[in-house]
Image (spheres, rainbow, N blue to C red):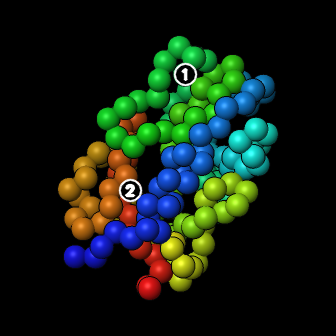
């Protein structure tokens, strides 16, 4: 059994904690739709939301749910969603691509990288419509309940 290394923990922490952003959305709130993808970059105090096509290499998050500002919480029962808050709250999940590897990025927290990159994490499987940790076998499961998706994560770099 492969041991889940520090790299996977670091990337998950960056996705979950580094992606928590509080700012005024302005026009983003009116234009954003569930399923849209984006890149959030910049500092915690001055984040920048950039809407992108989900196929873009730079699109690191996907809008899972849009909530009225400060009235509800993002869905629970799996991994915590990152949020981008203003007039509405965007519940964000990773826009992981099966077979791709991800690593640390100083501007956005996470970015696609070559799988040989030290401490990278490889997305072994993406199971859309399922919240099934067991389907990942020995891989680390990152489960999001709404929309239901399970990401199976493995160490990308061979160390």
**Percent coordinates x, y for residue 111 in the rendering:** 62, 63
**Left or right: 111, with 140 as reference point:** right
What residue is disc 2 on? 151
| Residue 7 locus on image (x, y percent) | 47, 68
Query: At 55% from the left edge and 66% from the top edge, which residue is drawn?
Result: 102
Q: Residues within 10 Å of mark 2 (few under 14, many from 20)?
A: many
Q: Nearer the viewer, residue 149 or 111?
A: 111
The mark nearer the N terminus, 2 or 1, is 1
State whether residue 151 is above or below residue 4. Answer: above
Residue 61 appears in the rendering: no
Residue 15 can be seen in this image: yes
Residue plotted at (65% across, 37% down): 21
Q: Residues within 10 Å of mark 1 (few under 14, many from 20)?
A: some
- Residue under label 1: 67
Q: Where, by quadrant of the figure, is residue 58 drawn?
A: bottom right
| Helix, strand or loop under label 1 | strand
Real-space CA distance between mark 2 and mark 1, rounded to the nearest whole angstrom? 24 Å
Q: Residue at x 53, y 14 (%)?
A: 71
The answer to which quarter of the image holds residue 6 is bottom left
Between 26 and 158, the one nearer to me in the picture: 158
Q: Is residue 64 left or right of residue 110?
A: left
């Amino acid at each position: 059994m492969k041991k889940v290394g520090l790299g996977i923990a670091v990337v998950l922490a960056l996705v979950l904690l580094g992606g928590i952003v509080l700012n005024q959305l302005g026009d983003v709130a009116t234009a954003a739709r569930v399923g849209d993808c984006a890149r959030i970059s910049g500092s915690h105090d001055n984040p920048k939301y950039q809407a992108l096509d989900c196929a873009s290499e730079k699109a690191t998050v996907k809008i899972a749910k849009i909530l009225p500002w400060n009235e509800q919480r993002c869905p629970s029962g799996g991994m915590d969603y990152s949020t981008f808050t203003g007039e509405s709250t965007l519940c964000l999940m990773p826009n992981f691509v099966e077979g791709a590897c991800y690593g640390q990025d100083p501007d956005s927290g996470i970015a696609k990288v070559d799988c040989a990159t030290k401490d990278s994490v490889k997305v072994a499987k993406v199971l859309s419509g399922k919240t099934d940790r067991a389907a990942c076998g020995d891989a680390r499961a990152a489960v999001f309940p709404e929309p239901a998706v399970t990401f199976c994560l493995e160490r990308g770099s061979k160390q």
